[in-house]
Image (spheres, grey):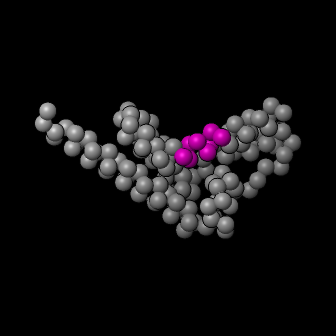
Amino acid sequence: MAYRIGAELVVLLHFAFVVFVVLGGLIAAWWPRAALVHVPAALWGAATALFGIVCPLTPLEQRLRRLAGDTGYEGGFIEHYLLPILYPGELTRALQIGLGAAAILVNAAIYAWVITRSRARSLRVP
């Protein structure tokens, strides 16, 4: 039972990390110090997609599932949990690269907005 709960907690953590990678720049807009954590997380998230790196949370979850008596699953977290919802097909290398590029573009747009907004505030005359 503890292994199964551990596996589910890893899934929740993994999902939260994916959301943070994609949208964490919005937190940085509100709290700029969050960028110190978000930028490396976003780079890691993009790198895993662009270069086919397996996130260490995936094998951890699968190991916990096996220890709980489950069989686990093939592939990665995004392919197993998110793609069936977002994209009802197979995770191809091109799609994986596209997801990494989308994460970079979304974050670049958010940070461009944050920087522009910050500069506009600093140029205001009291």
Q: Which residues are magenta?
A: 12-19
| Magenta span includes 81 | no
Depth order, front residue of 21/26? 26
Would you identify the image quadrant in which residue 67 lies?
Answer: top right
> Is residue 25 rendered to the left or right of residue 95?
left
Quadrant position of the N terminus in the picture? top right
Residue ranking furthest to the left: 125
Residue sitting at x 58%, y 42%: 16
Q: Is residue 40 visible?
A: no
Q: Tell whether 1 sits left or right of 104.
A: right
Taking the spot 51% from the left edge, 43% from the top edge, the residue there is 20
Residue 46, image x, y percentages: 49, 52
In the picture, measured across the screen, residue 21 lies left or right of residue 79, that is left
Q: Residue at x 69, y 56 (%)?
A: 80
Q: How many numbered badges does the structure rendering display? A: 0
Residue shown at 35%/47% (left/top)? 111
Question: Residue 45: where, in percent of width, then height?
Answer: 51, 49
* Quadrant location of the C terminus in the rendered image: top left
Q: Position of residue 15 (x, y in %)?
A: 61, 45
Residue 38, by quadrant, is top left
Residue 113 seen:
yes
Which residue ends up furthest to the front in the rendered image?
126
Q: Main secondary structure of the magenta part?
A: helix
